[in-house]
Image: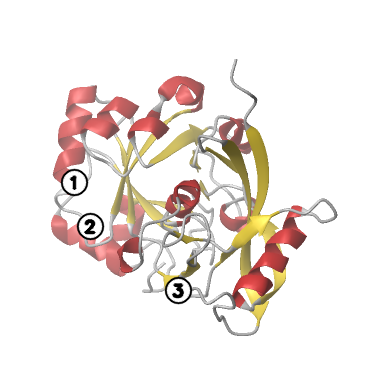
């Protein structure tokens, strides 16, 4: 019998600027994984909390002193010799200017385009993918008049995510429709398919969205970069997180932003009652509402 795998607790500082860029750094020469890029962070010492460790590592590595840190969900990654448990903290308020205190390169990276830096450290790749999720998503169905022009108009309003709700169609039709929409997406657009996870994989969608009851056995996370679950109510969100989903789509409309988006450990897309765009939240808007101009929103990238 092989010896038990060592488990290492690691705190991560996910620093995000007002434009949505993430602070990433290259592991310097002499360290394991040199040349790979990562979020700043390191091992949690016995005498400190995970939040304190994330803030300490950020200052030691890049010279930023965080003034607030919000816990995100914990991720695990298995290496041959050890299991890493990542405790990420979102940091959007800090003092100082970034500098590579260990001689490492660093960069502010558009989360939707990591091609500007080198390869990501394997244990940080999933967290980076989740942070690349668009803030605003528009819901499409087969009944909508979908065209290249209409999708590009949505992107001009900051909607770079497109949720195709095709669960009522047979898997074959889901694939065909998703592939057609993929060819119409604007640059940087992300297609999410709500339906059969295998259809999303076959259509090369960026993410699959399945009912909560299917989440533990759907296996979408293995075939696609991102996997979400559809939740009927707020009370289902904890079950979605327990099912190891990357994000959730809430069918229940929300009166305000307090229970969605950046208030949760995982991204939650929900329709906001009153038609207002809650700044900093993950918002879901129906295609007809968006094109009809009934949704109050600035014309800015999200």
The furthest residue to the front: 30
Identify which residue, 237 or 49, lies in the foreground: 49
Compared with residue 164, is residue 49 higher up or lower down, i.e. above or below? below
The furthest residue to the bottom: 96
Sequence-wise, the earlier of marks 2 and 3 is: 3
Identify which residue, 296 or 154, lies in the foreground: 154
Q: State left or right for residue 185 relative to residue 250.
A: left
User: How would you rate the neighbour count of disc 3 (Cα within 10 Å): few for under 14, some for 14-19, many for 20 or more?
Assistant: some
Secondary structure beneath dot 2 equals helix
The furthest residue to the top: 1
Position in image of residue 39 (x %, y %): 53, 61
Residue 168 in which image quadrant: top left
Give residue 271's mark.
none
Sequence-wise, the earlier of marks 2 and 1 is: 2
User: How would you rate the neighbour count of disc 1 (Cα within 10 Å): few for under 14, some for 14-19, many for 20 or more?
Assistant: some
Compared with residue 280, is residue 258 higher up or lower down, i.e. above or below? above
Q: What residue appears at the point 47 percent right and 66 percent down from the top-left corner?
A: 29
Q: Which residue is mark 1?
A: 181
Q: Which residue is mark 3?
A: 108
Q: Which residue is mark 2?
A: 151
Mark 2 touches mark 1? (CB < 8 Å) = yes
Q: CA distance from mark 2 to mark 1?
A: 9 Å
Mark 2 touches mark 3? (CB < 8 Å) = no
Secondary structure beneath dot 1 equals helix
Secondary structure beneath dot 3 equals strand
Residue 111 in which image quadrant: bottom left
Q: State left or right for residue 133 relative to residue 69.
A: left
Identify which residue, 258 or 253, lies in the foreground: 258
Compared with residue 112, is residue 126 higher up or lower down, i.e. above or below? above
Sequence-wise, the earlier of marks 3 and 1 is: 3
């Amino acid at each position: 019998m092989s010896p038990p795998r060592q488990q290492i607790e690691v705190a991560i500082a996910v620093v995000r600027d007002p434009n949505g860029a993430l602070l990433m750094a290259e592991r310097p020469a002499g360290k394991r994984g040199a040349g790979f890029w990562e979020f700043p962070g390191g091992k949690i010492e016995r005498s400190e909390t995970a939040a304190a460790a994330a803030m300490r590592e950020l200052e030691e590595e890049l010279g930023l002193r965080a003034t607030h840190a919000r816990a995100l969900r914990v991720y695990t990654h298995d290496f041959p010799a050890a299991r890493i448990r990542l405790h990420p903290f979102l940091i959007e308020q800090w003092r100082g200017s970034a500098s590579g205190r260990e001689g490492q390169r660093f960069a502010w990276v558009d989360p939707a385009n990591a091609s500007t830096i080198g390869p990501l450290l394997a244990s940080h790749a999933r967290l980076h993918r989740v942070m690349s999720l668009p803030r605003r998503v528009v819901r499409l169905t087969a009944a909508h008049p979908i065209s290249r022009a209409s999708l590009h108009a949505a992107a001009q309003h900051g909607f770079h995510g497109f949720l195709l709700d095709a669960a009522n169609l047979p898997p074959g039709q889901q694939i065909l429709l998703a592939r057609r929409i993929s060819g119409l997406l604007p640059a940087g657009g992300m297609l999410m398919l709500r339906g059969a996870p295998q259809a999303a994989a076959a259509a090369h969608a960026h993410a699959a969205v399945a009912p909560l009851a299917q989440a533990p056995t759907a296996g979408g996370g293995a075939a696609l970069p991102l996997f979400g679950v559809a939740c009927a109510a707020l009370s289902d969100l904890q079950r979605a997180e327990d099912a190891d989903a990357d994000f959730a789509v809430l069918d229940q409309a929300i009166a305000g932003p307090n229970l969605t988006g950046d208030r949760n450990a995982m991204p939650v897309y929900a329709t906001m009652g009153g038609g207002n765009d809650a700044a900093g939240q993950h918002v879901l808007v129906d295609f007809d509402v968006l094109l009809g101009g009934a949704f109050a929103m600035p014309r800015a990238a999200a």
